[in-house]
Amino acid sequence: MNVYVPNDACARAVGADRVAEALAKQPGVTVVRTSSRGAFFLEPLVEIDTPSGRAAYTNVDAKQAGGLLKKKPTPLSEIPFLAKQTRFTFANAGVTEPLSLEQYGFKALEKARGLDPQKIVDEVKTANLRGRGGAAFPVGVKWQTTKDTAADRKYVVANADEGDPGTYSDRMILEGDPYRLIEGMAICAHAVGAKQGYVYVRSEYPAGIRKLRAAIGHALEAGLLGPESFELKVAVGAGAYICGEETSLLESLEGKRGLVRPKPPFPAIQGLWQKPTVINNVVSFATIPDIISRGGAWHASIGTATSKGTMPLQLAGAIRQGGLVEVPFGISLEEAIYDFGGGLPKGSKFKAVQVGGPLGSIFPEALLKTKICFDDFIKNGGILGHGGIVVYDQRTDMVALARHLMQFTADESCGKCTPCRVGSTRAKEILDVILKGEGTEADLALLEELGDTMKSTSLCALGGLAPEPVRTAIQYFGKEFRRK
C-alpha cells in the first residue's frame, strides 16, 4: 500500500524523515514523499488511500510506525482546517509528488502556446488578478506594458525573496509544486515575447532551491523549456530583506548591491539590464495556470468586487493551529484567526494582530471584522501584503514590539535614501527612550512627524510603510507608550 509522508521543510523539522524511514521498513508499505498540506500543527501528517479518499494520521512519531497502520485514520473531510478551504493554487499541496512530470501535466502551457499572445494577456486582465506579493498591482497591466514595449530582449522574473516573518507560501510552492511556478512563468514568457527568465530565491530556502532546479532540469529534458521557447534559471540571493522590492531584486540579479531604483521608469519598460521585464511574485505566477485552463471570467467570479480569486493566508503567532490556508477573498480576520487558526491557546487572550509582515499595521480586536481583501485593509489603514497573519496575546509589550519592528527596518534599509536610512534609526532611538519610561508627549509628536516624512519622501515601501506599525500601535495602545 502507498503511504504518503510530507517532504516539506516544516514537516521534516518535526521528524517526517524519521517517520518515512520507519514506515518504509514495514512489510507491504511503499512510502511516497509528497509536500505538505499546510496544516503545520498536525505535522508529521501521514496519509493513506481509502475507498472514500485520503485519510490521515496526525502528529505521527517514528516510534508509532510499527502499529500505526492498524489504527483507524481520520478522513481529511473531518479535519475542519482542511475541509473548509477553497484550494486552487495550492490544490497539489500534500497530494502529488513535487517532481513528478506525469502527475503535473503542463496542460495549461500546452493550451497557452496554441493561443495568440494577446489572448493570454486579455484573459489575465479579465481575471482581474492583482499581484500577491504585497503591492497588489494588476498583473495584466504589467504584462500588457511589457508586451507592447519594443526591445531585442525581454525577461520574466519571479520574486521568491520571501522575507516577511510569518510567511511561507512561496516556499511551499518551491518545495511542493515547482512545476506550477515554471508553467506560470512560461505562459507569461509566451504572452509578452520573452525568451529568458529567472527565479530569484533567498538563500534561506535550500530545499526549495534544490527542488526548483531539479524541476527545471526535468522540464528541459521533456522539451517544455529550452532556447527556442523559454530558458529559466535560478538565482540565489544573500537574504537582504530589501531585495523583496522589485528594483532592488533586479539590481542584485545583475550582480550589484541591492539598492532601490527610482521609478519611473518601471521594470515593465526598463527592468533587468534595462530591458522590458515582467516581475511578479511566486503565488501570482502560480495562479496563472488555472486562469488559462478555466478562463479569466472563472477567476473573476471568485472573491470580492475588487479582490478576485483566492489568497493563501499564513497563520502564525499566538494561535492553536498554525499553517497555510487558501480561501476566497472576503472572509474576515476573525474567521481566519478563529475558524482556521483555532483561536488562541488556553491562558492566552487576544491583544493584537499584524498582517502584511514587519511593515504591516497592528490591528486591535475592534478591527477583527475587517475583510481580507486589498481595499478593506487600505480603508482601515493596513496592508494585506503577502498574506502573513501574526497574532499577539496579552503578554506582548507593544512598545517593545514597535521598537523591534523599527530596528528591523533600520537593519534592512538599503541606505540609498535619507528618510529611510536616518529616519528609521532616529525613530528607533526615540522608542528606546519611551521603552525606558522616559518618553514625553513631545517624543510621540516627533515620532508622528518623522513617520509622515518617511512615508511621503522615501524611495520605496520599506521606508514608506515602516512607520505604520508604530503609528497604529500608538493609535490603539497609546497608554503603553505613556509609561512613567
Image (cartoon, rainbow, N blue to C red):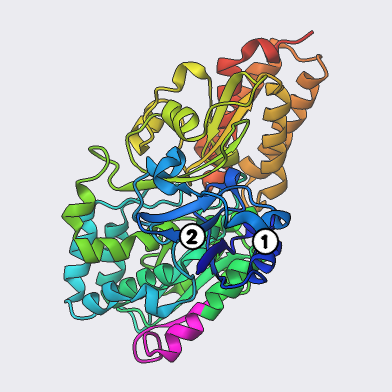
Q: Residue 288 is drawn in which quadrant? A: bottom left
Whole-number angstrom distance, CA of label 2 to CA of label 1: 14 Å
Q: Is label 1 in a helix, a strand or a loop?
A: helix
- Residue 467 vertical placement versus 97 (above, below): above
Residue hosting label 1: 19
Residue at the spot 38% in from the left edge and 52% down from the top edge: 131
Q: Which mark is residue 49?
A: none
- Residue 106 vertical placement versus 327 (above, below): below
Of residue 223 and residue 52, the one placed in the foreground of this image is: 52
Q: Position of residue 127 (x, y in %)?
A: 22, 54
- Residue 350 vertical placement versus 234 (above, below): above
Q: Is label 2 in a helix, a strand or a loop?
A: strand
> What's the residue type where badge 1 is placed?
Val
Residue hosting label 2: 48
Q: Position of residue 10 (x, y in %)?
A: 63, 54
First reached walking from the N terminus: tag 2 or tag 1: 1
Residue range (magenta): 215-233
